[in-house]
Image (cartoon, grey):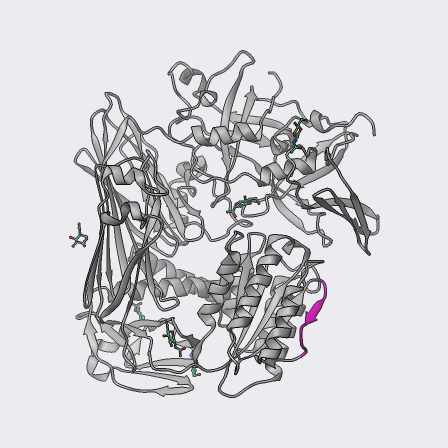
Amino acid sequence: MGRAVVQVTLFGLLLALTTTLPVKDDWDIYSFHINSTVSSRYAITVITSRVANRMDESKEIEFHVRIPKNAFISKFKMLIDGQVYDGVVKAKEQAKQEYTQAVSRGQSAGLISSVGRTLEEFKTSVTVAAYKKVTFELTYEELLQRKLGKYELQIYARPMQLVTDFKVDVYINEKASINFIEVKGGLSTKALANAITKTHADKEAWVHFYPTEDQQKSCDSCNDQGMNGDLVVVYDVSRDTNLGEIKVQSGDGYFVHHFCPSSLIRISKNVVFVIDQSGSMHGRKIIQIRTALIHILNDLVKDDFFGIITFDSFIYEWKRELVQATKENIRSAKAFARNIKDNGATDINGALLKGAKMLNAQPRKGSASILILLTDGDPTTGERNFEVIQSNVRRAIAGKFPLYCLGFGFDVNFEFLEKMSLQNNGVARRIYEDSDADLQLQDFYEEVAVPLLTDVTMTYVGGTNLTQTNFSQYYNGSEIVVAGMISDNDIGTFIPKVVGISVRLNRHCSLVSDSRVQRVWAYLTVKQLLEKGLLLSGSEKKDVTKEALRLSLKYKFVTPLTSMVVTKPQGETTDVLNKPKEGATQSEWNPPLVPSIVPGVRGVGYSPHTGTYSALLPQLQSRRHQGRAGPPGGKQNKWELNKHNAFFLSFILNHATPPLLLVTLVFCCVTLPPRPSAAPLIHRFLLKPGNQSLPLCFDVFGNLKLKLLHHPNSGQLTLIRQDKEIDVTVGDVRIVILIHGKREFLWPALRQQSSDTNVSGILGSALVISALADKDLCAFVFFFHRSSAVDYSIAANPSLTCWLMPAELALQRRLDEFIVAQL
Ligand SMILES: *[C@@H]1O[C@H](CO)[C@@H](O)[C@H](O)[C@H]1NC(C)=O
Ligand SMILES: *[C@@H]1O[C@H](CO)[C@@H](O)[C@H](O)[C@H]1NC(C)=O
Ligand SMILES: *[C@@H]1O[C@H](CO)[C@@H](O)[C@H](O)[C@H]1NC(C)=O
Ligand SMILES: *[C@@H]1O[C@H](CO)[C@@H](O)[C@H](O)[C@H]1NC(C)=O
Ligand SMILES: *[C@@H]1O[C@H](CO)[C@@H](O)[C@H](O)[C@H]1NC(C)=O
Ligand SMILES: *[C@@H]1O[C@H](CO)[C@@H](O)[C@H](O)[C@H]1NC(C)=O
């Protein structure tokens, strides 16, 4: 047993990224259809892919598509050689028990994973005999939500090869007139313009997208592997001035009410922005916040009142009380916004309480109050207990106005923000850390910029099993949707009524008939029960969850409570598909699937206790003789034992969304040198990828001097000593040395990375890790144990969950390279 050699460079990685994409020459998607029908905003989409194995041997054929996050998958089937294999929706727990084998293989959860802001990825594969065909068919459903005055249906097309018969068909059928329809998205470009046809006839509309193979190569995001982009069908329906539209399903008594009156006038608002300016907002984030805030201030209307609170370890009010949005005040607020600076820790509790107090201090009759929190991290100072903060905030707001929480980036505990928003009649949104973050912030603000009604109560005499009926505010551009059942199916006694402050509505509306109403009701009820489950605990939570599960099973929705079990032809593994959890960075790791190209190889485990790897490589030896056994493409990805008895492995360390962390390593044998037992543990290092990924950590043993950061062209050094930290700027690198605790323990935290690629050292390496992000890779899984490490890069020293791995792997270099013989 030799020792492990881990040898990776960033360039090697990028190379690996391009070479692990599956080669598709040997199978052919000869037909790919997406058919979406929207009836009263409820969209049912079917993706059908027909694939032929053109080879004289059996082949693993993959089905790999993207669907909107908001959708529930409701059906999946495969047709092979006249035989149908149906996916079955089961309670997650039950699927887990029945298919322990599939689940323990680590194939359970990675198959539907979250990609980017709006999509989830669905992936499965099956072996198809020589010259045989397979048809995959996936159905998903979603209720289109009206935002900023429109509905959007997003369809993602990425077959990963050119397809002779490629079609997207959308049919929209509404009970009210469709007043406009547009096609947008990455595929709606000039090159593809004549592949798109759009027909619009009062209450119906059709969109067809039939690109030729040539066109499939020619759009912006397309190449020889075909299209990769989305089509977004955008539309709205005309509305009348009264109660809106109520649809009933003839026969079984379900109804759905779309409430969206057009003739209301805006009511003035009182809005308080509570903005995190803690140290972690440093750099682009704080610049984007300033930009967004300045735009938003420009959009305030004269009869609005507003306040701005910024916070770090302290809380700063621009003005002690709400002020009117006069020209003079806006000018002064913009000057304040331009000067928002990052610094210190995060006191969410104190800041929110101050915001609530400001709104409570000046209740204005007939106006709408709104509290907006923007933060990029967890509370690190002041009150830090999530539950205590939630209960404080709830008490302070007392149901009087909604709280909207915007979570910036992936260091936030989104569940905490979501729960707090829901407890206060608001919603939480994620702001993705990207170049358009300022626009995302402005878009969110626009959604709540024009309140039309407050305290909206929808009542339905003769209605039962209603979805949510009380809404704290109703904004221009949105829509309230309530579904339920009509008691005894007696339309004669059914009286809908809407009461809201600022306008009283109580008019008749016509009942129209629609066949999808029951599914709309089920979809809304399940979504709302899942949200409610977040707020409850104990037996109440159990009841709500039980009902959500019952309905998920009844309507065959793949929700967070259910799994879809896909049984395949004999001899093949069953897939258990789960819906990914939004931003589930802390609580759940969804291991990606081991691609079936190399069945048998399941990954490698590393035991922190013994310091040994245990590889699950039952068939490696035999596969060596089978030609290309590894991911096809690149030479270095061949599964070959070389003369050092080492082989190449690629793997993804991923728990859901990008970035996937892919490391190629030369791995030798099965056992690493055991941890030197005599050497004391000197430190546990933590590498924070900065977004979605769980941090990595590793231990360094023995009495070593390690190079933390080496900057070859250091330039000028600036040193600022503050109370608990020393701020060092060298060239374009900024480091804050934090002074921790009573032991006066110093720890350097990198706050601004250098653009110089020659920077080396452990802190420099962390940058390499955080720079990796890519989406579409398949490779091999390693299982690392979860552990925890203290984060000394912020004053509060929180303990973070991390993946414990050998230093070599985390640093992607041999540890020797960081050891300094003498200072
Ligand atoms: C799309 O699906 C609907 C509903 O199943 C069906 O009626 C329609 O014919 C399909 N359209 C196409 C173009 O296949
Ligand atoms: C609501 O938004 C529409 C555009 O979506 C606009 O035409 C209308 O004037 C707005 N209503 C109010 C009251 O601002
Ligand atoms: C409607 O609610 C009643 C109780 O109010 C319950 O017994 C019934 O099962 C519910 N119906 C559905 C379809 O959930
Ligand atoms: C909705 O609001 C009304 C009036 O404010 C109240 O009587 C009722 O209890 C509320 N219903 C729910 C489910 O909160
Ligand atoms: C990095 O170092 C190499 C050789 O030492 C030098 O040629 C190169 O210019 C350096 N890169 C930068 C960005 O300074
Ligand atoms: C993750 O962080 C890296 C580096 O900070 C960045 O390049 C990448 O785009 C981020 N990924 C996402 C999904 O935000």
- Quarter assignment of residue 503: bottom left
Residue extent of the magenta highlight:
313-320
Q: What residue is at 40 percent from the left and 65 percent from the top? A: 528
Residue 420, placed above or below residue 300: above
Q: What residue is at 31 percent from the left and 29 percent from the top?
A: 24
Q: Main secondary structure of the magenta part?
A: loop
Q: In the image, 527: left or right of 519?
A: right
| 807 part of magenta stretch | no
Location of residue 739 with respect to 548 vertically, above or below: above
Q: Nearer the viewer, residue 572 or 361?
A: 361
Whether residue 98 is visible: yes
- Point out residue 560 in the picture as x, y percentages from the top left corner: 41, 54
Quarter the C terminus occupies: top right
Q: Position of residue 176 (x, y in %)?
A: 23, 72
Whether residue 168 is visible, yes or no, is no
In which quadrant of this rendering is ligand 4 seen? bottom left
Residue in the image at 68% along x and 27% along y: 815
